[in-house]
Image (cartoon, rainbow, N blue to C red):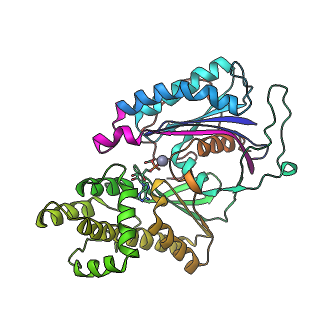
């Protein structure tokens, strides 16, 4: 089957064409992600209507070259399905992707499969790039489709169950218990800001550009690596931020308190803040966030007897967090699945893969929708879901 994935839930416009016979070996015929981050920088966050207009502009511009690269004809590429993110995300942006998918589906006479963005992030953690051995990649012969010999190949790993997924992005912070393929239960979530949102807001308080996560990470790493920085950091040991809900009796999170603590701290410091002070705050902030995420995840692993740990979402690009989770998984003696390369951020490959798997579910519970999909900005559930 060949599936086109469409992702427009936030500020990335992404399209991907994947081919697979079994959902395990996935050949990526073409894949594009266009980030709007630079455009939103002046607003210090994503401005929904601007993002929507950009998606409307980008999608039709990106499609022809995507199809050409995939070796498919624009008039009728003979796809098997179109997978589109219908939620959660910014509704004006989601609608743009949905309308685009529905128009193409009508034109090409193919079904549309609705995909939950968070399920996409779960699958992105399980994808591993592999050397393409054409003998192992069953390729469906099509008169209209040119076989691509150099298409990147991925393997979709199957974790042991129960598995635990931590999803950390600009809009979400969730601990998800996965009892079996497609059986999810959210056991904890943030009660206020998402962890990526906290990174972005703290970066803004420190006068750093959007998106703030990579900026904070960069400064904090400098402090960790430079001896001089460490000495300075110990002199700045007054920089101590709270670890909200660290000892709470559940798996929920709260990050807005750390951000407020940074605000009060800055008010007490002489301005403008020096780079050293910014770096010390960045490091302490990163330490606080990491401590809470690791403690809650570790507790959930123990309580639910998780056999594998999956992490998805843009924040897991963070070097310090990655190291901390590698250590946690080693100590718990369990496999850790973290997305490779640019699969941490929003992308359409994960949406195409989720759509493919939903469409080929043996119980047939996901019916392709021919038309009239609805954007679900707060889609907190992945179907089928027990909670
Ligand atoms: O998953 P994603 O690309 O988009 C959403 O669905 O939100 O995540 C974006 C978030 C932003 O808040 C960004 O600051 C954060 O991921 N992020 C990072 C890093 N790289 C991106 N946070 C911490 N450290 C990073 N290196
Ligand atoms: Zn995302």
Q: Nearer the viewer, residue 324 or 184?
A: 324
37 part of magenta stretch: yes
Can I make out residue 210 in this image? Answer: yes
Left or right: 345 in relation to 178: left
Q: Nearer the viewer, residue 45 or 20?
A: 45
- Compared to 144, does 19 lie above or below? below
Residue under the image location 29 percent in, 67 percent down: 279
Rendered location of residue 255, percent (x, y): 31, 61
- Compared to 201, does 355 lie above or below? above
Can I make out residue 244 in this image? Answer: no
Left or right: 358 in relation to 216: right
Rendered location of residue 166, percent (x, y): 49, 61
Rendered location of residue 292, percent (x, y): 38, 70
Rendered location of residue 375, percent (x, y): 47, 32
Residue under the image location 53 percent in, 53 percent down: 344
Q: Nearer the viewer, residue 157 or 40?
A: 40
Left or right: 146 in relation to 265: right
Residue under the image location 60 percent in, 28 percent down: 63
- Toward which corner of the image does residue 148 lie, by quadrant? top right
137 part of magenta stretch: no
Q: Which residues are magenta?
A: 23-49
Left or right: 186 in relation to 233: right
């Amino acid at each position: 089957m060949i599936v086109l994935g469409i992702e427009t839930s936030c500020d990335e416009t992404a399209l991907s064409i994947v081919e697979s016979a079994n959902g395990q070996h996935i050949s990526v015929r073409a894949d594009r992600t266009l980030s709007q981050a630079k455009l939103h920088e002046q607003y210090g966050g994503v401005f929904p209507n601007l993002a929507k207009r950009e998606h409307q502009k980008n999608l039709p511009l990106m499609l022809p070259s995507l199809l050409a690269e995939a070796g498919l004809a624009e008039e009728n590429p003979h796809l098997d399905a179109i997978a589109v993110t219908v939620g959660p995300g910014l509704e004006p942006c989601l609608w743009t992707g949905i309308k685009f998918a529905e128009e193409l589906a009508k034109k090409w006479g193919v079904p549309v499969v609705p995909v939950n963005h968070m399920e996409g992030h779960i699958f992105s953690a399980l994808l591993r790039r592999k050397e393409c051995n054409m003998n192992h990649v069953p390729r469906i012969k099509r008169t209209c489709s040119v076989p691509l010999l150099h298409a990147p190949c991925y393997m979709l790993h199957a974790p042991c169950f129960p598995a635990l997924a931590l999803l950390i992005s600009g809009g979400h912070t969730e601990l998800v218990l996965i009892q079996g393929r497609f059986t999810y239960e959210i056991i904890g979530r943030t009660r206020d800001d998402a962890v990526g949102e906290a990174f972005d807001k703290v970066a803004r308080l420190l006068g750093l550009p959007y998106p703030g996560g990579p900026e904070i990470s960069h400064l904090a790493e400098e402090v960790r690596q430079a001896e001089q920085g460490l000495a300075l950091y110990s002199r700045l040991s007054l920089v101590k931020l709270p670890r909200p809900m660290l000892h709470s009796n559940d798996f929920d999170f709260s990050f807005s308190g750390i951000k407020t603590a940074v605000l009060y701290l800055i008010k007490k410091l002489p301005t403008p803040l020096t780079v050293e002070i910014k770096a010390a705050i960045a490091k302490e902030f990163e330490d606080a966030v990491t401590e809470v995420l690791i403690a809650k995840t570790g507790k959930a692993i123990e309580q639910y007897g998780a056999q594998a740990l999956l992490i998805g979402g843009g924040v897991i690009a963070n070097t310090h967090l990655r190291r901390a989770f590698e250590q946690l998984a080693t100590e718990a003696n369990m496999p850790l699945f973290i997305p490779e390369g640019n699969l941490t951020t929003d992308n359409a490959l994960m949406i195409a893969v989720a759509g493919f798997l939903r469409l080929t579910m043996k119980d047939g519970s996901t019916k392709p929708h021919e038309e009239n999909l609805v954007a679900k900005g707060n889609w907190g559930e992945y179907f089928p879901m027990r909670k």
